[in-house]
Every structure is written in structure tokens, then in C-alpha cells.
Amino acid sequence: MGDTRGSVNETKRSGHMSSQRRPTGHIYVVERQSGRVWFAKWRDGAGQHQKRLGPAWVKPYGQTARGAPRWRAADGPKPAGYLTPDDARDELHALLAEAPIEQQPQAPQERVTVRQAADEWLRYEEHEAKVKRSTVMDYRNCADRICQHFGDRTLEDVTPQEIERWKAGFRAERRLGDGKLRRTQPSPRTIRKYLINFNGIYRRAREVYGITANPVTEVKRPGRVKAKQTLRSNSFLEPIDVHALLTATTDDTDRAIFATAAFCGLRLGELLALRWRAIDFERSLISVEASFTRGREGTPKSGDGRTVPMAPEVAESLARLRERQHYLASRDLVFIGRGGAHIDPNALRKRFHKALERADLPRVRLHDLRHTFGTIMVSRVDPRTLQQWMGHGSIEVTEMYMAFRDRAEDAALVSDAFRVP
């Protein structure tokens, strides 16, 4: 997260070159009684340093792979003197720009291409920052699209005007059910994501290669997507619909998956990674420990495991799967595909839609069974409990279900308020 200053100064010295080791550093938030505060820590030619930057205008949105909170700008207008994450990074850059530079011998460097810088950025994010594997894969997809256009260009030669033209002609890629690739007009959120990642490539290049100019910062990003989510009333099923779906499902494994998704609120990747050791029939609990995404297992989306209650309907479906002949060891998958491997998620989605058709139900996504759980349980438990059960990184995500709380008594309250004595 550090920044650098100046270009590499090289002079011949005893057959070697002398280069500057630029200051590097990072920012972090400290929780205090008076509120959250930004601090900067950096290393330069004079040693290590730390400085208080100012009060933090942030809110959490999940955790890193190491369990540290992630921060984004808080909602609403920022009070005077407070710093968002971007403000704090700018403060760090200003400190590093004034920091003394350490001289050290170094071989001369070649001009770095965007592709080389992207490879270094991906290496850092995966092996040093330790971001989740699914996030690294998303970063890699973005880097590949960026390198298709800029890969062979040197970092110094890319201009803001070229990035603007690339942005204007950019098309999102979506893989259809028949395997064909379709290019569509990207959403503002997609454009913003690619520019943020392109900026990350340049930021890392500043730390490693001493690049001073970053043309991505001069390209206007689409407005930030509103963090608060909304949920349409046709994005989930009613309880009677869930039972109709399970009745119309002919395969025991599929029925157990659909029941677990609807009655426990698990994500598809969490269902596909579920193993028998996570099923506690005696205490009626399921432990969510992993997620199967893009062909490999990793941590759940929030980065943390959790425990959810197992309804009798789910226990009955899972007990029926225990009657099979193979793959019943504690480490074996509960829902198995061919040869005991993970189930193909795309094939599962097709079977789900066919079951909806047989039950004469509206077409919804398999993921909407999780929304069904959230909209039903929000009237039965407090939001914090629902947040824990669903594995949301922040309560703001859980709040999208609040509009579906059962508040039938509110009509009587309004009537009483308007009653004439």
C-alpha cells in the first residue's frame, strides 16, 4: 500500500549500478474510545516511522484472509477533518514523497510493461496480501482483459487518453449456457472495478519499479454503486412454494441441496463444499467451513466459518443420503457428483429450473433459495442472529431483508394514532 517518489538514479560504481531504495508503507485503522483513527507506518532511509493521520470516516465490509477488517468510506457526507481510505492513502503518499531515500547497489532495470507489472501485482495480492483465492481469480480475469489491450506497452507510455478510449469501447464478457461468449455493454460497477484494478497495477509498480506517473488516476470513474442493497419481491419463494419445489424434485441429492439452501440459507459454493464432518445430527447443526468456487475450495465469502441450525426437513433429507453405499467418511462430500467429486454447478442450476417448471413455480435463481431463507427468518430472529446465520460480512447486507419483516400489527398502530376521541 506504500508509495514511492522519484525515478531510479543509476551511476556506474565498481562495475555495478547504484539505485535508490524508495520508501514504502501502509495505512491502518485503530479503534479508540473516541472513534476510529487512521495511522500510517512506513520505512525509509532513516528507519521505521509511524504517524497519526486523523479520524477515520469508514465502515467495515468484511475481513481479509488474515482476519483483519476491511474498510470503505462511510455513508453520508464526510465531516470536516475526517479521512476516507482514499484520503488516508493520499496522506501516506505525501509522507513518502518527503521521506529520505536509501541508496543501494542494484543492476540496471529494463522498462517495465503493463503485463510484467500486472504479474507482479497478482503475485503480491496472492502471496503477500493473502487475499482469497476467488478474489485473486477475479483480479486475474481483470488483468487479462487489461493486458489484451495494454500488455505489451511500457507503463510510462500509457496515457490517460488511451485509457479513456479503451474504457469507452470496453465490453463485458458473459459465458452463456451453451458455452458461447457474449459481449455486452458493461455496467458502471464493472467499469469502476476494472479501473480500480488497473490503478492497483500502477500502485504496485510505483512500489517495486519506481514508476512516478499513474495515468489511471486521471481517468474519471463511474459513481460508486450505492452500498445498500434492495431485494425485489419476486426474488424469492414463499414457504408453500419451497415445499412444492421439494416435492417436484425427483433426485434425492438435488432435493437435499434445495432443502439445505432454503432452510439453512447456504450459498451454492458452501453447499457444494459441505462434508459429512460438518453435519451434527445430534445437535441439529451444520458447520459452514468452506466454499467451492471456480473449480477449487476456499474459505466462505465472508472469510469466516459459521454454524447454522439444521431444520428437521434438512436432517431428514441428509439422513436419506447417508443410506448410500459409498463416500460416507467424515472428509467425504455430502453432495457428490461423478466419482465422489464436486457437483457441476451449471448442471445443478438446470435441474433446479426444471424442478421449478414441474412445480409450476416462477423461474428464480438457485441463489434465491438463500434469499427465501433471509426473507422468512427476518421476522423470526433479530438481525444480528440472521447476519451470523447467513455469514454476512456486515449488518448493512442483512438490512436488505428488513423490508420483508412481518409487521401486520403496524396497521393497527396507525389506526390508533388517527382515532378521534
Image (spheres, rainbow, N blue to C red):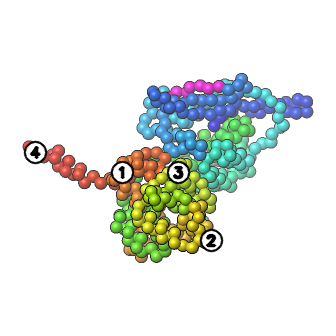
Residue 102 place in picture, x, y as percent: 76, 27
Residue 85 can be seen, yes or no: yes
Report the residue marked by disc 4.
Answer: 420
Marks 2, 4: nearer the viewer: 2
In the image, 216: left or right of 106?
left
Q: Residues within 10 Å of mark 4 (few under 14, many from 20)?
A: few
The answer to the question of whether label 2 and label 4 lie on touching residues, with beta carbons closer than 8 A, is no
The answer to the question of whether label 4 and label 3 lie on touching residues, with beta carbons closer than 8 A, is no
Report the residue marked by disc 2.
Answer: 339
Residue 17 place in picture, x, y as percent: 85, 33
Report the residue marked by disc 3.
Answer: 305
In the image, 144: left or right of 414?
right
Report, in whole angstroms, how far the alpha carbon at label 3 lies from the one at label 2.
Answer: 27 Å
Magenta highlight range: 49-55
At mark 1, the secondary structure is loop
Kind of residue at badge 1: Val
On whether residue 54 falls in the magenta region, the answer is yes
Kind of residue at badge 4: Val
Q: Residues within 10 Å of mark 3 (few under 14, many from 20)?
A: some
Name the chief secondary structure element in magenta: strand
Kind of residue at badge 2: Gly
In the image, 108: left or right of 284?
right
On whether residue 219 falls in the magenta region, the answer is no
N-term mark: 2 or 4: 2
